[in-house]
């Protein structure tokens, strides 16, 4: 993938005052020019900026044509305090793409694995649907595709948009009958099919509060590298020793 | 007696037809009619798998130990126990196969195995065990007792390893605190011995009701195993709950006092343990009492398996996750659907048919006649 020809970004993308989306895209271009094993994709989510609009959840569903019961990035709402001193906070929960992923060693057929760029991938054509990986995830980040459709009960049956092709893991698939990914474990993959085309993950592009950052942590000039130096950086369940690649600014 | 036979036969046919309906639904609708989801991913069928694996290992260990330790009075049960073991492992594999999202890819566990996964180890062990049972059947047919005994000895570590590994399949998942305890493999082996022993007691009561010595010994074995199982269960529950501060306490309280409290207290403790203990102490040599105790202990053991598989999954890994996205599949509550019970009926009826066919057409009880003749002659 290194060195793939991508459309040029505006000149302003490389300026210090550039919009963060443009800056992150410029960061990505540099990362994509390197071999995959030298990239370290990470996501940083600033919880103080998340407004709980669920745009990321919805855009993820639209991007990956997710069926009922399959969700890659729910937003957990937390309430704290007691009246009149109350507050709400929101925590998006994508797959953590752990560096020590509990879901990978449990797969009996090696259908899920860590890619050289650190993303945990599921080979839909190899997955037997035993759901051991789903049980093993300490973040409940994997869901099972039962083969359901949102519009099945509608007059006229399943609407065409539910059977539109998806491009997860760079492969065109139409979800139909019992073909994969039906019957498989599914999860967030940082929109790897978009990354390889120089686009940010769908959740990052659509984040209304600009609370989600994405990039190559191995690049000292990248925005995420800058954010990873923050003292208020946290990971979920550090005691699980999973070494997540999703960080939260609290 | 004839009327009872017709009644059981009729009930079996009805149950089997209902089971076939369930299997047809499963094959045509995939998993859509099942009640499990993405948070409670394993339901009744996985509990059934664990149950039948236990039965298989327990029956085999019974046969092997009786022969290796030369317990003459129980030796006539050897072939019946081995056949039960074979049927049970078959039903267990059927249960796990129907639980897969892609059954047609099950062969991948052999063609591209991942030996860091407990599931791979289990599948390979079941296969080795199946081959071993085939070899034993061959040498029994060839009347080569020395080879049979040798293979039974070889089978002991395998038959300890696969229920133990079944426990480890759950226990190795650090994400699930309820399962993640070193006691589980031991617990599964004892559970296997108990369910297998109880089934053997029930079979012995039907096949040799007049053998008071067999009844008494089988009764004592079942009694001892129920006691051992209860002690382990006490450890399993009391240690995390003792000071009331462990996070597992909440799940345990769900088992003991939650919506399905009756599964633990009524089905398992009362019907599965207390009543059999009473029966076994009341008339230790009676085939009716020992047989009934065996039937109760073995049938209710499914409750133990359900209380392992389901509660381990009912706690959100992250607080608030259960309300983050509304969908029936994204729920931490689970109850088996009618469809799942229908398929369960299929497993049970196939198992019963397998047992019946064995006893009807295979020389499973011939050895006993020889032994009885020898005993009379002596």
Image (cartoon, rainbow, N blue to C red):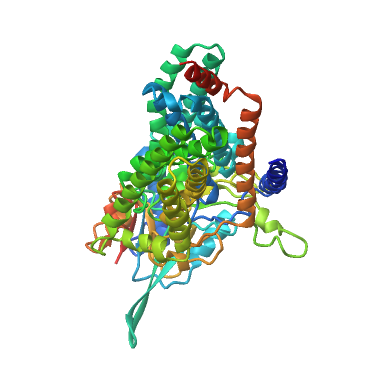
> In this picture, is A82 found above or below B15?
below
- Residue at point 59% right, 55% down? A65
How many callouts does the rendering have?
Answer: 0
> In this picture, is B306 found above or below B149?
below
| Viewer-nearest residue: A160 or B74 | B74
**Residue B373's x, y, as percent?**
53, 18
> In this picture, is B208 found above or below A168?
above
Residue A1 visible at all: no
| Viewer-nearest residue: A121 or B374 | B374
Residue B285 visible at all: yes
**Residue A165's x, y, as percent?**
64, 50
- Residue at point 35% right, 40% down? B185
**Residue A69's x, y, as percent?**
56, 58
**Residue B263's x, y, as percent?**
47, 58
- Residue at point 37% right, 27% down? B157
- Residue at point 39% right, 25% down? B71
Residue B180 vs residue A66: left or right? left
| Viewer-nearest residue: A246 or B245 | B245
> In this picture, is B340 found above or below B121?
below
Q: List the single residue furthest toward the front.
A: B377
Residue B4 vs residue A217: left or right? right
- Which quarter of the rendering shows the C terminus of chain A? bottom left
């Amino acid at each position: 993938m290194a060195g793939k020809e991508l459309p040029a970004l505006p000149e302003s993308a490389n300026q210090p005052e550039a919009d963060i989306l443009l800056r992150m895209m410029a960061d990505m271009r540099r990362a994509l020019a390197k071999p995959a094993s030298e990239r370290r994709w990470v996501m940083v989510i600033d919880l103080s900026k998340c407004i709980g609009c669920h745009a990321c959840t919805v855009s993820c569903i639209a991007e990956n044509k997710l069926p009922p019961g399959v969700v890659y990035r729910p937003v957990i709402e937390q309430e704290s305090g007691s009246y009149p001193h109350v507050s709400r906070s929101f925590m998006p929960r994508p797959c953590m793409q752990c560096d020590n992923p509990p879901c990978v060693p449990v797969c009996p057929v090696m259908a899920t694995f860590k890619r050289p760029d650190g993303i945990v991938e599921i080979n839909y054509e190899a997955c037997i649907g035993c759901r051991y990986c789903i049980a093993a995830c300490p973040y409940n980040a994997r869901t099972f595709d039962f083969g359901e459709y949102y519009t099945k009960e509608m007059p006229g049956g399943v609407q065409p948009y539910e059977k539109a092709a998806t491009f997860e893991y760079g492969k065109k698939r139409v979800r139909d009958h019992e073909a994969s990914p039906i019957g498989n474990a599914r999860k967030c993959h940082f929109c790897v099919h978009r990354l390889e085309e120089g686009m940010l993950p769908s959740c990052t592009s659509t984040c209304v509060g600009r609370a989600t950052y994405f990039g190559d942590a191995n690049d000292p000039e990248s925005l995420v590298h800058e954010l990873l130096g923050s003292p208020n950086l946290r990971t979920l369940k550090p005691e699980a020793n999973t070494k997540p690649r999703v960080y939260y600014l609290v | 007696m004839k009327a009872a036979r017709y009644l059981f036969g009729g009930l079996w046919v009805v149950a089997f037809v209902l089971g076939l309906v369930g299997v047809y639904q499963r094959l045509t609708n995939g998993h859509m009619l099942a009640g499990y989801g993405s948070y409670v991913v394993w339901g009744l069928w996985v509990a059934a798998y664990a149950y039948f694996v236990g039965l298989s290992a327990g029956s085999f260990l019974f046969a092997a130990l009786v022969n290796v330790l030369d317990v003459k009075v129980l030796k006539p049960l050897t072939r019946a126990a081995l056949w039960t073991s074979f049927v049970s492992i078959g039903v267990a594999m059927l249960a796990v196969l129907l639980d897969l999202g892609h059954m047609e890819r099950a062969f991948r566990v052999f063609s591209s195995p991942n030996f860091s996964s407990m599931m791979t180890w289990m599948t390979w062990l079941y296969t080795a065990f199946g081959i071993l049972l085939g070899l034993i059947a061959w040498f029994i047919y060839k009347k080569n007792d020395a080879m049979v005994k040798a293979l039974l000895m070889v089978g002991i570590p395998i038959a300890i390893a696969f229920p133990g590994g079944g426990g480890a399949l759950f226990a190795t998942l650090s994400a699930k605190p309820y399962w993640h305890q070193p006691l589980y493999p031991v617990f599964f082996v004892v559970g296997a011995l108990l369910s297998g022993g109880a089934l053997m007691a029930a079979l012995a009561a039907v096949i040799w009701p007049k053998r008071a010595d067999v009844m008494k010994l089988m009764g004592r074995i079942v009694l001892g195993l129920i006691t051992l199982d209860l002690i382990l269960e006490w450890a399993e529950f009391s240690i995390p709950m003792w000071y009331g501060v462990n996070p597992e306490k909440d799940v345990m309280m769900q088992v003991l006092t939650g919506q399905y409290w009756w599964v633990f207290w009524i089905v398992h403790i009362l019907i599965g343990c207390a009543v059999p203990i009473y029966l076994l102490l009341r008339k230790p040599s009676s085939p009716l009492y020992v047989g009934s105790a065996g039937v109760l202990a073995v049938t209710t053991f499914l409750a133990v398996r359900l209380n392992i598989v389901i509660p381990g999954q009912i706690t959100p890994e992250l607080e608030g996750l259960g309300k983050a996205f509304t969908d029936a599949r994204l729920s931490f509550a689970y109850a088996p659907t009618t469809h799942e019970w229908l398929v369960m009926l299929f497993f049970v009826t196939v198992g019963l048919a397998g047992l019946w066919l064995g006893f009807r057409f295979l020389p499973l009880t011939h050895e006993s006649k020889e032994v009885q003749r020898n005993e009379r002659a002596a």
